[in-house]
Image (spheres, rainbow, N blue to C red):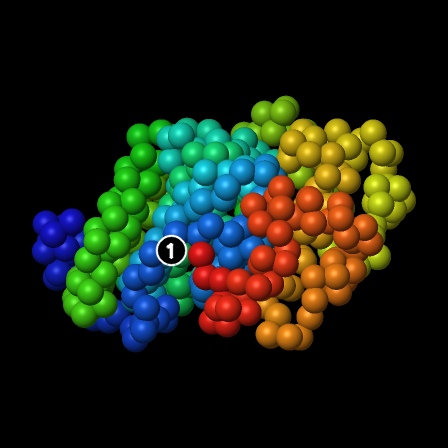
Amino acid sequence: MASAVSRLSAEASIGIPQSVKISDPAFTPDRTVTVEEIHDPTAVGAGIELIDQDAVQLLAVPFRARRVVVRLEDTAVLLHSTNARVRTRTTVRAGCFGWVAFGHRARGTVNGVAVRPGLVLAAAPGEEVCFVTEAGWESITFLLSAQELTAQLAARRRETEFRLPRGVEMLRAGPERVGRLFGWGKRLAEVASRHPGRFAERRPERVAAQLELLETVLATVDAAGDHEPSRGDRRQGAQSVLVQRAEAFAVANLGDRVQVGDLCRALSVSERTLEYAFKELLGLTPMAFLVRLRLHRVRRALLAARPGSTTVSSAALDGGFWHFGEFSRAYRECFGELPSETLRRKAESPLGHGG
């Protein structure tokens, strides 16, 4: 990493005209590097200002995830790994473009499309992506400020030829190129996590790393073509749309104890079609997933509650659970503790649940 930084200290070394200046940081900066060990699926979306995330754990196993975020100047790199099967909805916030490179052992789907070696995900600002990730998942997300990216493309006179994503796209760049992109991001994250002060205190190194990041992403995207989805991808893509529509309806009516029949009527599909889509994509029946959604909602409510402001029974009722014994058993199976223990732990640690 040190040699790369020294090579990139001068803008001219990678062809950036001297007239092009790096703007004041967009992503910033009191926390240049953050390393989080996350043990609660409801905490996946917390503490990160660059993207919006919502996660639901699909299997009842002790949850572990690790996230390293390196904020450079107008770009950021996120290393994410997990040990569990998880459905994660992720939205790139306005003003950023995102590209995701997958580790060679990553297994799962992106909007229903199976993750394979050589694929890169590209997402435009404000686009939502649905990931279903298996245990052993590892990915690197590259977030680039739209303003800075546009300025750098203009400096290279490439603003009309570079392919910016218009929505959510899967690109085929080949295993070797994607491996280099993933490896570059992982090395940066590992170095930054071991030496966070180096990036926080030395702006020239952040600028150099940002320029190298830009070149690496540009080279990968330049070499990429459209991914032609297989028949299975197209089938699962349609199932993903159906599952996301079902989830949106369920979330909008979560306190009403939505049943499978309600989903079928709202979406104008048969129960068999809906069940097949859920099992194929998530490995759960629609009813089992609805229960998971409600359990996660209750846990968030308990963890967000001010001391003395709620009770377990009140939170359970708000989440659509009426049988408290069954609720407590399901909650413990999902999160490894009783809801009363969650509420008590929150009361004893009012600063929050972190990881």
Task: Answer left or right for 319 relative to 218.
Answer: right
**Where is residue 17 drawn, in percent x and y?**
19, 64
Total numbered badges shown on the rendered structure: 1
One can see residue 3 in this view:
yes
Q: Residue 208, located in which quarter of the rendered image?
A: bottom left
Which corner quadrant holds the C terminus?
bottom left
Q: Residues within 10 Å of mark 1 (few under 14, many from 20)?
A: some
- Where disc 1 sits, the SS reads strand
**Where is residue 142 drawn, in percent x and y?**
38, 52
Q: Which residue lies furthest to the top in this view?
A: 231
Task: Answer left or right for 76 relative to 98.
Answer: left
Q: Identify which residue, 332 or 112, lies in the foreground.
A: 332
Residue at 79% in and 35% down: 274
Residue at 18% in and 54% down: 14
**Where is residue 153 drawn, in percent x and y?**
34, 58
Q: Identify which residue, 222 or 158, lies in the foreground.
A: 222
User: Relative to 20, does residue 69 appear above or below in the rendering?
Assistant: above
User: Relative to 284, does residue 317 appear above or below in the rendering?
Assistant: below
**Where is residue 294 drawn, in percent x and y?**
71, 52
User: Relative to 106, does residue 78 appear above or below in the rendering?
Assistant: below
Residue at 62% in and 46% down: 332
One can see residue 236 in this view:
no
Which residue type carries mark 1? Glu
Task: Please name the residue that numbered disc 1 is placed on.
Answer: 36
Residue at 39% in and 52% down: 37
Task: Answer left or right for 114 relative to 79.
Answer: right
